[in-house]
Amino acid sequence: MTALRILSCGPGVTVQDGGRHGYLRYGVTVAGPMDALAHAVANRAVGNREDSAALEISLGGIEITAEDGPLTIAVAGGTFQTTLDDQPLPAAVVATLEPGAKLRLRAGAAGMWCYLAVAGKLDLPAVLGSRATHARTSMGGLDGRMLQAGDRIAVSPGARAADSGTIVAPLLNLPADVIRVLPGPQQDYFAEDQMAAFLAGPWRISPRGDRMACFLEGPVLRHAGGFNIPSDGVAMGAIQVPGEGQPIVLMADRQSTGGYPKIATVIGADLGRLAQARPGTEIAFRAVSHGEAVRALAEQRASLDAPIAIEPLRRDRFSSEFLLGRNLVGGWIDARQPG
C-alpha cells in the first residue's frame, strides 16, 4: 500500500479531520483543524470529502516523501514556503509526490497553520468516529500524539487524482486585522462601558497561545462584580475574560465547559483568520448581527460547494540539474551560410 513517510518534523504537527462531534457532554474535546476553511480546501482539491483526515502543520514545518507508489497531495493554509525536490511551489498547490521525492514545508511570509491533504484515505483508526488528534488526552491521529520523524502512514487510494496546479482560493489568507464577533453571551457580567472598551482595543496576539486558546494582550477589562460564573458549555471562538482582565479566545482543543464570563464570540467565518494570526499581530474586534454572521458563513460554504479552481503551474525558476536534464537545443544555424 502506498504510504506517506515523515523525514523531518517540527513540533505541533498532527492529523486532523473535521473533528470529534457529539461528545462534548461527556467532556470529550472536538479537536479538528484550527483553520477549517484551509483544511477543507486542501481536501477538496484532491477529491476528498472536506472533513477527511489531513496533516495540520505548524511553523516548525515538515519534510515528507512517498513510499511504494506516488501520492497526489494538496497544500493550503498559511503562506508557507513549499518545495518539491528543492524546486519552489506555490503556497497553495496540488502536486504529485513520486516515491523518493521530497516535499518540504517551512514557515513563510504569513500564517500559523498549513494543511497537507493526500488523495485517498489516511489509514488510521477512528476513535469515537474521528481521526482528529487531541494530544492532551492521547486521542486520535497516530497513537494520539504529534507526528515525528520516521512516522509512516499508509494511504488507501482515492477515487481520482487531481491535476497539478495552483489552488485558487480567494477566501484563504485574508488579513486578521478586524475579527467579527457576536456580543455575549455574558456581556452583562462586565461594567457598562467594557463592551466599548473591548471593541476599541487595541489587542495583540500573545505568544502564550496554542491549539487550545489564543491569548490577547491589551487594555484590562473590568467585571461588574466577580469573574466566576456557573460553568457552562463553550464554543470555539468564545472569548472568556478571567480575573486578570485579559481575554482568552477558545480554539479547536478547547475544554468542554468554562467558568469565566464570555464577553463575545468570534463568528465562525473568522475563526480561521484568527487562528492564522501570528504572535505580535495587532487585531481589532467588530460587533456584528447574527444575520451578518450567518451570511459570512454562507459565503464560505458557497466557496466550498463550488469546484476548487486549479490553475496550471508556471515554472519560473530552474535548477542546474533540471536544465542539464533537458534538451534545450531545437536546431542550429551556420553563420557562414547566406540568409
Image: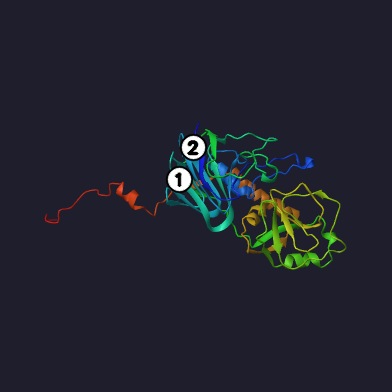
Instruction: Residue 307: tell me if it is visible.
Output: no
Q: Secondary structure at mark 2?
A: loop
Q: Quadrant of residue 287?
A: bottom right
Q: Which mark is residue 152?
A: none
Q: Give the residue type at disc 1.
A: Lys
Relative depth, front residue between 277 and 178: 277
Pointer 2 local density, CA inside 10 Å: few below 14, some 14–19, many at least 20 = many
Cα separation, mark 2 vs mark 1, equals: 19 Å
Residue shown at 65%/42% (left/top)? Answer: 133
In the depicted view, which residue is nearer to us: 270 or 28?
A: 28
The extreme right residue here reads 225
Q: Which element type, helix, strand or loop, lies under badge 1?
A: loop
Residue located at (47% from left, 36% from top): 67
Residue 33 visible in image: yes
Q: Quadrant of the C terminus?
A: bottom left
Give the x, y percent position of residue 79.
Answer: 53, 55
Q: Name the kind of residue labelled 2 in the image.
A: Ala
Residue 224's spot in the image, x, y percent?
86, 64
Circle on res. 161: 2
Where does the image place residue 69, in percent across and percent down from the top left? 45, 35
In the rendered view, does 255 fall on the left or right side of 228?
A: left
Residue underneath mark 1: 102
Q: Earlier in the sequence, mark 2 or mark 1?
A: 1
- Along the viewing direction, whichever of 1 and 18 lies nearer the viewer: 1
Looking at the image, residue 279 lies above or below residue 296: below
Q: Position of 323 compared to 98: left or right?
A: left
